[in-house]
Image: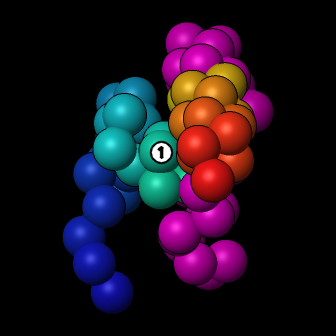
Amino acid sequence: MRYYSWMRVSAGEHISEDDLEMYAMGRIGDLETGPIEEHLLVCEECQDSLAATDELIRALRGALKEGT
């Protein structure tokens, strides 16, 4: 298992942008999503960051589709 910075989330830290991107793209395994999802339930700042990340991913995917 790769070491993710979200493993420190239980210590009260926010989820890193890299880990939010991995989560948003579904690149974190089911067993590893628990700490992220628990943190997202209570952290508005990370919820906002995830929403922005989701929006960016949608825009990039849309641009790729337009380019093909």
To which residue does mark 1 refer? 21
Examine the rendered structure and indicate whether residue 21 appears above or below residue 33. above
Closest to the observer: 50 or 12? 50
Left or right, 13 with reference to 48: left
Residue 26 lies in quadrant: bottom right
Principal secondary structure, stretch drawn in magenta:
helix
Q: Tell me: 61 left or right of 22.
A: right
The reply to whether the magenta stretch includes residue 19 is no
Name the residue type under label 1.
Glu
Q: Is residue 48 above or below residue 2?
A: above
* Range of residues picked out in magenta: 24-52
Horizontal and vertical percent for residue 47? Answer: 66, 23
Which residue is at a point 63% across and 53% down the rendered structure image?
68
Dot 1 falls on a residue whose secondary structure is helix
Q: What residue occupies the far front of the structure in this picture?
A: 68
User: For residue 46: magenta?
Assistant: yes
17 lies above or below 51: below
The image shows residue 66 at horizontal and vertical percentages of: 68, 39
Expressed as whole percent of the image width and height from the top left, the position of residue 60 reads 56, 36
Q: How many marks?
A: 1
Q: Residue at x 28, y 51 (%)?
A: 5
Closest to the observer: 45 or 12?
45
